[in-house]
Amino acid sequence: MEIFPGAVHLPRFLSLAEQLELAERCQAIGNGPTGWYVPTVRGGGQMRVRMVCLGRHWNARTYRYEASRRDHDGRPAPPLPPQLSALAVRMAEAAGMRLLPDVCILNSYDAAGKMGLHQDKDERQDTLAAGVPIVSVSLGDTAKFIIGGLTRKDAKTMVPLASGDGFVFGGPSRLRFHGVAAVLPHTGPPELGFDGRLNLTFRQGASPP
């Protein structure tokens, strides 16, 4: 379902069995030795999600990708498992795009979790200029995903992202402002066995050329 040119919603892309397997893998990563932390951004405020970055670490203070979590505990970023990369490639292909991800940002939202309106523009300029897409995967509770235009003031559209949904935005939509306005409690499949929402966003261009 195309929301804007280059912005494609893939409802119910993952079966329940695939969601269960992916949720188990994500929880194991988040609860592992280099797992969840709450990023502190420029100015000292804390984000309203728990995060772990795979492949490369996104530094919330410098807005740069790095090999280690210098803004938190100094540990090296965990590797990006090939099974997760393959899922992102498959979703991008389903939306008619191509992605070779080198990073995945895994976010965990509780009932009060949100993500302010922002652009994802910290990847390399060559991939941004080429419109290489971002692939987002949702698990658990439904999110009110907001996507607008290329300026913060442009009109915005709300897309409910349910468990198992994919969302791909690239090409002319690669730099659209977007965010999560709210998470709707108790809307996810009870079989997943957790409250809240897990979100994986895959990007290309986090590693040096």
Image: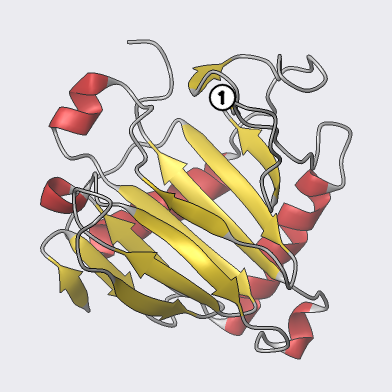
Image quarter where the N terminus lies is bottom left
Quick one: which residue is furthest to the top in this view?
209
Q: Quadrant of residue 69?
A: top right
Report the residue at 59% width, 28% height from top: 60
Q: Which residue is mark 1?
A: 56
Q: Quadrant of residue 108?
A: bottom right
In the shown orientation, is residue 5 left or right of residue 152?
left
> Could you tell me which secondary element the residue under label 1 belongs to?
loop
Q: Is residue 130 above or below residue 62?
A: below
In the shown orientation, is residue 75 left or right of residue 113?
right
Q: Is residue 39 above or below residue 187?
A: above
Report the residue at 55% width, 48% height from top: 83
Q: Name the residue nearer the viewer: 148 or 203.
A: 148
Residue 53: horizontal and vertical position, in percent?
A: 63, 35
Q: Name the residue nearer the viewer: 179 or 15.
A: 179
Q: Is residue 126 above or below residue 19?
A: above
Q: Name the residue nearer the viewer: 142 or 151.
A: 151
Residue 68: horizontal and vertical position, in percent?
A: 68, 15
Report the residue at 49% width, 24% height from top: 63
In the shown orientation, is residue 14 left or right of residue 35?
left
Q: Is residue 41 above or below residue 85?
A: above
> The residue under label 1 is which amino acid type?
Arg
Residue 20: horizontal and vertical position, in percent?
A: 70, 73
Residue 177: horizontal and vertical position, in percent?
A: 31, 52
Crowding around mark 1 (Cα neighbors within 10 Å: few <14, some 14 to 19, many 20+) is many
Image quarter where the C terminus lies is top left
Q: Name the residue nearer the viewer: 22 or 174.
A: 174
In the shown orientation, is residue 24 left or right of residue 138?
right
